[in-house]
């Protein structure tokens, strides 16, 4: 599978994002994760690495599941209890797991996210990195003769904790390219940090002369890369240190990988994409030495492509991103004022090669055509901060202008808008030409910058039908929250969670949808109610049969048009994981996965169910749902339950606790006056009390849910209206409600007036309502201490009989003025 790791953009201009936030958030608490530290941070292809994983609730580890192929975890040792280490936001480390990671010789290099399946849980996500070079331990050396010697084309595993320089010595021949590429921010798996991962790198000769240095760059942003062609035979020094000293926290954070060698390290590839399955000649723009050319065989699959250019049998430590499309390339004509564009769709490739340069293109379209125009520049590692415009040749102003992308329209649509990413500086627009004829498409750098590295690619293609799914953690700083985002289903039980939907820019399908799953383990069933047109989230329930073996697997949960097929409908799935964050959610590193992990665990000690109501929920009404738990194997702990997802217009009780020894409770739901009429599905989720501080994120708890029940929202039996009334202290009056009968009922309905001020009360007889009745009269009495003033929120609570139950509804809105008593 593909992973995307956008990080903080190098550009300092502010970004403004739009993002669809779910209607409610979870109140803040400790952001505890199962896995807080993974050491070592990396291993070489073809080796076996002894691993130490620290965190909480890591008892009885059964499996490590990786999102990418090439690593297997073996030889799990018994979980150790270690001295508690406090971390940010009320989190801590108290447990340690030891195992081995077996890395295949052909394992993909780079970041490998994983989760752990224990006997009872699916953990939060952490990461491990794979390198192609041998790993050398950093020994905190000093400058000159005491610098630690390392072989060329190796990876140093170091740690910055005191702000000092780490020096490494290599021997080179004149004319060789010497490159250091540092991974630190991108390497980190920590939740919160300050600046301890912001490093700088320098290359010096043996006399201490600086030959190259770097802090930030367009390719890896805060992780430095520097390269030089060495002038003579001899020793050279590599200096790695923090850009500004930050001490880190209790786990000694500040680690890094420094890849040092003669490997190729082009910073930009041009053009950065081409037609699927075709050979493409590209130019590699190097930071040191001459640019080189290579021919790349592009894959058949459309989308992103990881390119590792080879030179003298060596490959770089990290990729260059390229694009693969279904349509041809167009290369800018540098000498032309306006490069002509043929038929659409097309992929335009060019370079803003000097300051204040503007590249323009001529294209012919028809009014009413519908296109998506997307720039790929910063996301490809080029420094171009693009602005584009599209203007008819007969017009004096553009139809379209853009210089960034709203996060909801980006590829990283599952991430939170507080996190800034370099890819969000690449504009994308939906374009419907207002006229027939010739248009000019222009592009420039918003700062007026430009040089040979300022390459870009503009893909112009028709919009398509595309709606994607994602899991969104509704917690502080959008940190991981297993209780909301990790589907772990106990054997013979079920779990329900919310999946959100995001329309792609220009999506052409507006009808009803249905969820479907790919890759579910045998014995696991997915149940999901249909989605109405425009619905942006929905509940999905996973049910594990009693004989389903405990396991974890990668799955896809997508959507498709309900009841029929739409040609070329596209649906992806996505989840985002922030790292190196600060309070407020501004993470420096963000991992995007394109699959979900589902686990089947050992049986839970209880099941929970909710009775199917026999009466409807009335608009502006209330309904109590009877909830029961069945305890197993002597389990007597607390069980908390709540509604994870509620149909539109319906609200529910806060979390309710069933205390030890108890088995029943009532969960109340209410419907607004505008709640859609008809039936909707509802399930309740529950959790054990747990022994850890993970109540907020769910660490250390088992979770199960009820089956789906049907909630029928119906029109109220009656509505009430009234004229403003008044009463004096010490007097009585009638308050008359006019009844509008909407649905018949049998028997008599009870009515209670609410919202009366202190000192005013209803006196007997309390009124009843019969079907067809035109008025409802309450007799009010005010004592001599009744609160004076206007009261405009008087209502009635009406209990309408239906069978042996009563339907509760809240109706009417009246006004009452309380006046002083008349002087005697």
Image (cartoon, rainbow, N blue to C red):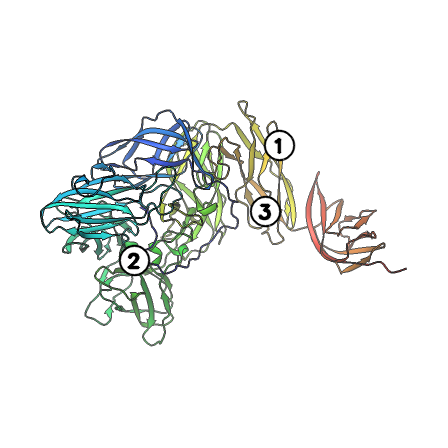
Disc 2 residue crowd, few under 14, some 14–19, many 20+, Cα 10 Å = many
Question: Pointer 1: what residue?
Answer: 664
Q: Residue 4 in the image: state x and y as whole percent.
A: 33, 47
User: Mark 2 and mark 1: span between their CA atoms?
Assistant: 57 Å
Q: Left or right: 165 with respect to 465?
A: left
Question: Pointer 2: what residue?
Answer: 376
Can residue 206 be seen here? yes
Query: N-terminal of the two: label 2 or label 3?
Result: 2
User: Mark 1 and mark 3: span between their CA atoms?
Assistant: 21 Å
Residue at point 36% right, 74% down?
397
Q: Residue 235 in the image: state x and y as whole percent.
A: 13, 44
Q: Residue 454 in the image: state x and y as whole percent.
A: 25, 61
Secondary structure at badge 2 equals strand
Q: In terms of depth relative to the viewer, which is nearer, 92 or 353?
A: 92
Residue at point 77% right, 49% down?
769
Query: N-terminal of the two: label 1 or label 3?
Result: 3
Secondary structure at badge 1 equals strand
Q: Quadrant of the N terminus?
A: top left
Q: Give me the disc on residue 651.
A: 3
Farthest residue, direction top: 634
């Amino acid at each position: 599978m593909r992973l995307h790791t956008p990080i903080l953009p190098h550009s300092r201009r502010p970004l403004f994002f739009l993002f669809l936030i779910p209607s409610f958030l979870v109140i803040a608490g400790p952001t505890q994760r199962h896995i807080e530290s993974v050491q070592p941070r990396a291993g070489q292809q073809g080796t076996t690495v002894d691993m130490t994983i620290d965190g909480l609730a890591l008892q009885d580890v059964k499996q490590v599941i990786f999102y990418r192929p090439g690593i297997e975890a073996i030889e799990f040792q018994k979980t150790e209890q270690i001295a508690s280490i406090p971390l940010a936001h009320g989190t801590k480390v108290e447990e340690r797991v030891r195992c081995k990671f077996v890395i295949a010789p052909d394992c993909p290099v780079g970041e490998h996210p994983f989760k752990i399946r224990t006997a009872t849980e699916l953990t939060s996500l952490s990461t491990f990195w794979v390198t192609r070079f041998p790993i050398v331990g950093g020994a905190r050396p000093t400058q000159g003769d005491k610098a630690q010697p390392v072989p060329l084309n190796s990876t140093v595993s170091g740690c910055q904790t005191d702000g000092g320089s780490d020096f490494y010595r290599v021997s080179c021949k004149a004319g060789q390219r010497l490159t250091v590429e540092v991974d630190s921010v991108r390497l980190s798996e920590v939740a919160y940090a300050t600046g301890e991962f912001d490093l700088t790198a320098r290359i010096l000769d043996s006399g201490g002369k600086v030959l190259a240095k770097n802090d930030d760059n367009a390719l890896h942003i805060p992780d430095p890369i520097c390269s030089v062609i060495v002038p003579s035979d001899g020793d050279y020094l590599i200096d790695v240190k923090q850009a500004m000293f930050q001490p880190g926290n209790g786990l000694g954070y500040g680690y890094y990988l420094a890849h040092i060698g003669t490997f190729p390290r082009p910073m930009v590839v041009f053009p950065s994409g081409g037609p699927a399955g075709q050979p493409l000649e590209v130019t590699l723009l190097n930071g040191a030495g001459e640019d080189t050319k290579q021919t790349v065989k592009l894959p058949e699959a459309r989308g992103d492509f990881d390119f590792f250019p080879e030179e003298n049998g060596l490959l770089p430590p990290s990729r260059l991103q390229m694009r693969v499309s279904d349509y041809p390339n167009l290369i800018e004509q540098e000498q032309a004022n306006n490069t002509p564009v043929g038929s659409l769709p097309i992929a335009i490739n060019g370079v803003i090669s000097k300051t204040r340069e503007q590249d323009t293109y001529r294209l012919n379209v028809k009014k009413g055509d519908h296109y998506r125009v997307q720039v790929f520049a910063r996301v490809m590692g080029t420094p171009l901060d693009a602005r584009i415009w599209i203007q008819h040749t007969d017009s004096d102003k553009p139809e379209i202008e853009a210089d960034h992308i709203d996060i909801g329209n980006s590829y990283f649509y599952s991430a939170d808008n507080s996190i800034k990413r370099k890819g969000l500086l690449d504009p994308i627009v939906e374009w419907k030409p207002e006229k027939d004829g010739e248009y000019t498409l222009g592009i420039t750098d918003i700062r007026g910058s430009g040089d040979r590295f300022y390459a870009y690619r503009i893909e112009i293609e028709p919009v398509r039908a595309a709606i994607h799914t994602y899991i969104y953690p509704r917690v502080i700083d959008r940190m991981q929250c297993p209780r909301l985002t990790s589907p772990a289903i106990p054997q013979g039980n079920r779990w329900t969670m919310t999946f959100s939907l995001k329309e792609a820019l220009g999506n052409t399908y507006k009808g009803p949808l249905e969820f479907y799953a790919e890759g579910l383990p045998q014995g696991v069933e997915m149940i999901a109610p249909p989605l109405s047109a425009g619905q942006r989230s929905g509940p999905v329930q996973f049910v594990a049969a009693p004989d389903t073996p405990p396991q974890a697997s990668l799955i896809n949960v997508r959507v498709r048009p309900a009841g029929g097929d739409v040609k070329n409908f596209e649906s992806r799935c996505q989840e985002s994981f922030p790292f190196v964050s600060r309070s407020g959610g501004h993470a420096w590193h963000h991992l995007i996965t394109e699959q979900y992990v589902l686990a089947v665990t050992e049986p839970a000690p209880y099941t929970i169910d909710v009775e199917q109501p026999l009466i409807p929920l009335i608009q502006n009404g209330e309904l109590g749902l009877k909830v029961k738990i069945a305890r197993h194997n002597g389990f007597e702990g607390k069980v908390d339950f709540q509604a994870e997802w509620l149909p539109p217009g319906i609200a529910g009780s806060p979390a309710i606790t069933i205390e030890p020894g108890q088995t029943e409770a009532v969960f109340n739901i209410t419907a607004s006056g505008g709640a859609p009429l008809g039936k909707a599905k509802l399930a309740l989720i529950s959790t054990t009390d747990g022994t850890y501080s993970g109540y907020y994120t769910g660490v250390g708890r088992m979770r199960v849910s009820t089956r789906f029940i049907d909630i029928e929202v119906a029109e109220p039996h009656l509505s009430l209206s009234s004229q403003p009334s008044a009463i004096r202290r010490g007097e009585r009056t009638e308050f008359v409600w006019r009844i509008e009968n909407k649905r018949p009922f049998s028997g008599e309905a009870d009515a209670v007036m609410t919202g009366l001020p202190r000192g005013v009360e209803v006196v007997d007889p309390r009124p009843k309502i019969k079907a067809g009745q035109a008025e409802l009269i309450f007799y009010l009495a005010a004592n001599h201490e009744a609160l004076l003033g206007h009261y405009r929120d008087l209502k009635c609570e009406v209990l309408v009989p239906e069978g042996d139950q009563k339907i509760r509804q809240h109706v009417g809105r009246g006004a009452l003025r309380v006046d002083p008593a008349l002087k005697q």
